[in-house]
Amino acid sequence: MQNALVDFDPKALAEHLELKPFQGRQIFQWLHQKGVFDFDSMTNISKAMRADLKSRARPSHLELVHLAESKKSPGTRKAVWRLQDGETVESVLIREGERRTICISSQVGCAVKCSFCATGISGFQRNLSPGEIAEQATRMTVSDAMEGRTPNIVYMGMGEPFRNFDNVVASIQLLTHRDGLGIGARKITVSTAGEAPGIYAFAEMPWQVRLSLSLHAANDVKRSELVPLNKKYPIAKLLAAVDYYLEHAGRQITLEWALLRGVNDTKQDANELADIALPRRAFVNVIPYNPVAGLPYSAPDRNSAAAFRDHLLHRGVQVTLRKEQGQDIDAACGQLRRRVEEFASS
């Protein structure tokens, strides 16, 4: 895959184009800070340079092919982007009061194949480049739905970020760059399904980027059914990596729990989760499941979901129950991309 200019930081961009450092910084600002990908609109660059850039460089990777906005949750929208090789990925902008969260993808498809996830149905195609990852956030950030607010960025879209570790790290460096969006590291969260080596490597990074673990079950039998990666890194090995992270990084971890009716929503499940969360002072994010056509899972009703949360609170766990959003726009990971591709091939 050929690099686009969004893949480079200002210094590398100037070197790649054989320009002066300040010119590389100007182009980087247009791409990453202002979300402008048309050379003709880069008005502080000479016309001669713009013509030269058009003849020998590609500014970006993404083309918007579908945008859905939720009627039930105004301001929440999901985008499907087409990449230069024809593959597609998804991003979601979630609006909750004053808060804006952008969920971005790190891979085309996913090889982890969690049993309840739409992304794994299509299989894994390839890793995304740093620019392909960061450009999702940039394009969503400059949209009118942001209302000038700085978003939280979560790597919870398609793919397992720690199986694309180097490019994910490079994309975070693009997103936090002072000449780009300048997102604070604490406003960025990387979510893993349990790739233990990646957790160890993440613990060594000299930054304040947050980590979340998609746990979903707190015993090996149930978790291996939901998250096949658990067979390679069972809970004991996974928690050893988490404990290393807590000791070396000194930052709180979030445990993600997709709440599935009749699967992981009982009092026993809550107790097992609490036994993991409490000694690690972990924050728990309970997410009512967003149903996926063809998969045998559904969300519990609101009272059951609230009871699960309340039991965790009673145990002393820091927990939030996420409000259900985006079902009308296929907001669960991989859903909208799958529907768009099915429509395109029909």
Image (cartoon, rainbow, N blue to C red):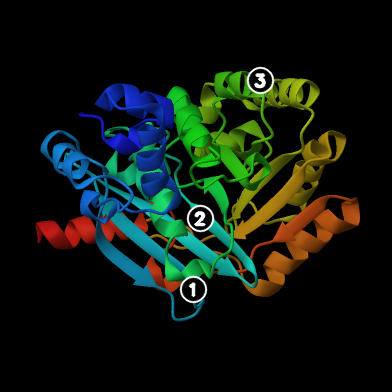
Q: Distance between the residues labelled 2 and 1?
A: 12 Å
Quadrant where the N terminus sits is top left
- Residue 28: % across, % down: 39, 40
Along the line of sight, which residue is nearer the eye, 169 or 193?
A: 169
Q: Looking at the picture, which amino acid does disc 2 mark? A: Ile
Q: Looking at the picture, which amino acid does disc 3 mark? A: Lys
Q: Earlier in the sequence, mark 1 or mark 3?
A: 1
Q: Which residue is drawn at 78% across and 41% down?
A: 282
Along the line of sight, which residue is nearer the eye, 118 or 3?
A: 3
Quadrant where the C terminus sits is bottom left
Above or below: residue 5 compared with residue 150 = above
Image disc number at residue 75: 1
- Report the residue that reaches farthest toward the bottom: 71
Residue bearing the label numbered 3: 237
Q: Looking at the picture, which amino acid does disc 1 mark? A: Gly
- Residue 51: % across, % down: 14, 43
- Residue 126: % across, % down: 29, 31
Residue bearing the label numbered 2: 102
Q: In this view, does 53 lie to the left or right of 192?
A: left
Q: Is residue 231 left or right of residue 313?
A: left
Q: Check disc 3 and report its element: helix, strand or loop.
A: helix
Q: Which of marks 2 and 3 is in front?
A: 2
Above or below: residue 202 compared with residue 267 = above
Along the line of sight, which residue is nearer the eye, 266 or 332?
A: 332
Along the line of sight, which residue is nearer the eye, 60 or 155?
A: 60
Q: Distance between the residues labelled 2 and 3?
A: 30 Å
Q: Check disc 2 and report its element: helix, strand or loop.
A: strand
Image quarter for residue 241? top right
Label 1 crowd bin: few (<14), some (14–19), many (20+), radius 10 Å: some
Question: Residues at badges 1 and 3 in contact (C-beta under 8 Å)?
Answer: no
